[in-house]
Image (spheres, grey):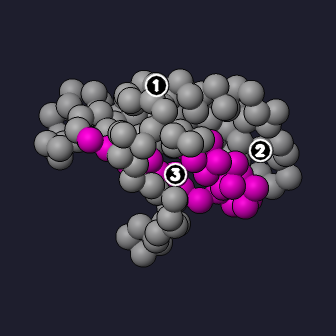
Amino acid sequence: MKKINLMDKYPVYTVEIKKSELIVSTTEEIINFIKEKIEKDPIATFISVFDHYSHTKDIKWEIDPEIKNAKIILYCFWKAITNPVMLWVRSRNLAIVEFEDKFVISFLEAPQEPANEKIQSWVNNLFIK
């Protein structure tokens, strides 16, 4: 997983994974795998899955023809409310974009490094050992 600066202002972790390198083979299986990690975590709470691909298709906007599926897992991650402005970063998301032979998984950097490390470990656990 690498960290990039999307549009020169958004710190994003992203990884491109060949399907042959994964223990699962579909977007839904990745979602179920990550959802299980969230539900087992003592400070994370699963919120929902947003089907970005269907939404974009329904409103007839552009989708790269190589993209086969695109979903976002929404969850809350952390254990305290110590600053009212920080609430907006507490809800997190993990984007999963499926292509014919690979997935691209990305998430915006969290304000706490332990959260970034945990999310990266969840994604890394998708790789065949």
Which of the 4 image quadrants contains residue 67? top left
* Percent of width and height locating residue 25: 38, 29
Secondary-structure class at tag 3:
strand
Mark 3, Cα crowd under 10 Å, few <14 / some 14-19 / many 20+, is many
Query: Tag 2 or tag 3, which sits nearer the N-term?
Result: 2
Secondary-structure class at tag 1:
helix
- Per the model, the C-alpha gap separating discs 1 and 3 is 18 Å
* Percent of width and height locating residue 91: 63, 42
* Residue 66 visible in the displayed image: yes
Q: Residue at x 42, y 24 (%)?
A: 28
Residue that mark 2 sits on: 78
Query: Tag 3 or tag 1, which sits nearer the N-term?
Result: 1
Find out whether residue 103 is within the magenta segment: yes
Q: Closer to the camera: disc 1 or disc 3?
A: 1
Q: Residue at x 64, y 48 (%)?
A: 121
Q: Amino acid at mark 1?
A: Glu
- Per the model, the C-alpha gap separating discs 1 and 2 is 25 Å
Magenta span covers which residues? 101-124
Q: Nearer the viewer, residue 68 or 7?
A: 68
* Percent of width and height locating residue 22: 45, 38
Residue that mark 1 sits on: 29
Which quadrant of the figure contains the C terminus? top right
Q: Closer to the camera: disc 3 or disc 2?
A: 3
Find out whether residue 52 is within the magenta segment: no
Q: Amino acid at mark 2?
A: Trp
Query: Tag 2 or tag 1, which sits nearer the N-term?
Result: 1
Residue that mark 3 sits on: 107
* Residue 47 visible in the displayed image: no
Q: Residue at x 37, y 28 (%)?
A: 26
Residue sticking out furthest to the front? 129
